[in-house]
Amino acid sequence: SLTGSESNGSGSLRQGIVTEVGPEGRVRVNCGLQHPISLVVPPEMAVDERERVTVRISSRSPVRAKLVDEPRPGFEVTRADLSAALDRDDAGVRIATSRHGVELTTGRLTDVVGRIERDGMTVAFGSPGRGLPAILDLPADSLARSWPVDGEDEADAESGVESGAPGRFDLWVNAVPNQGSGVVRTEEAMFAALGCLNLKEK
């Protein structure tokens, strides 16, 4: 949550999920308090069940809160097919993560962080039950290709990104080398991969 005072009121801003849309313009919202709370929807807002909303809490005991139509801090969560995400104009460097990919090292990371900082990136993760190779029906032994080296295509050498990688990705990366287990939980893989790939070039 964000705490402090702003021009339209004081209190803390919290993110919540609408769990039920009721009559008379009221909704029930789960926003991290002990129980979901019932709130009036402002006339200028329209919300649906399972929608993410912003709640301003001015008192916890008794609970006083209201829905506010303000920009939500943090990540924006959307649903999209993988092909649609890879086809976006702002997809940047398209990176797939897999234990069968090229092991991420400090040298290889240096090759790609400049391009990521300039163009952004789209990173795809599998699941503990099915990794990306199985999901995309790709042979695992085709993924660990060598990193670009001097003398390759000029565009590839400049970007540090491998051309022709399987599955419409620019790179297949193993971000947790020596992981010591057959699978890594998706949330652990996200922290490991994004923590490295978001490093700055300088």
Image (spheres, rainbow, N blue to C red):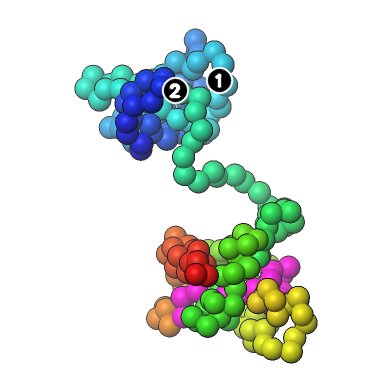
Asked if the residue at tag 1 contacts the one at tag 2, i.e. Cβ–Cβ closer than 8 Å, the answer is: yes
In this picture, is 163 found above or below 118?
below
Give x and y (percent) for residue 62: 23, 19
Tell me, yes or no, whether the highlighted magenta stretch contains residue 175: yes
Which residue type does callout 2 highlight? Leu
**Amino acid type, callout 1:** Met
Q: Residue at x 38, y 31 (%)?
A: 13
Towards the viewer: 22 or 10: 10
Q: How many dots with numbers?
A: 2
In the rendered image of this protein, does residue 155 appear above or below residue 32? below
User: Label 1: which residue?
Assistant: 45
Q: Residue at x 62, y 59 (%)?
A: 120
Which of 161 and 31 lies nearest the eye of the viewer? Answer: 161
Residue 117 appears in the figure: yes
Left or right placement of residue 113 versus residue 168 in this view:
left
Give me the C-alpha separation between circle 2 and circle 1.
9 Å
Q: Which residues are magenta?
A: 161-177
Element at badge 2?
A: strand
Quarter in which the N terminus is drawn:
top left
* Residue 153 within the segment the image draws in magenta: no
Q: Is residue 132 visible?
A: no
- The residue singled out by tag 2 in the image is 67
Give percent across and percent down for residue 169: 69, 69
Neighbourhood count class around disc 1 (C-alpha, 10 Å): few under 14, some 14–19, many 20 upward: few
Q: Residue furthest top?
A: 24
In this rendered view, identify the residue nearer to me: 75 or 160.
160
User: In the image, is 17 to the left or to the right of 34?
Assistant: right
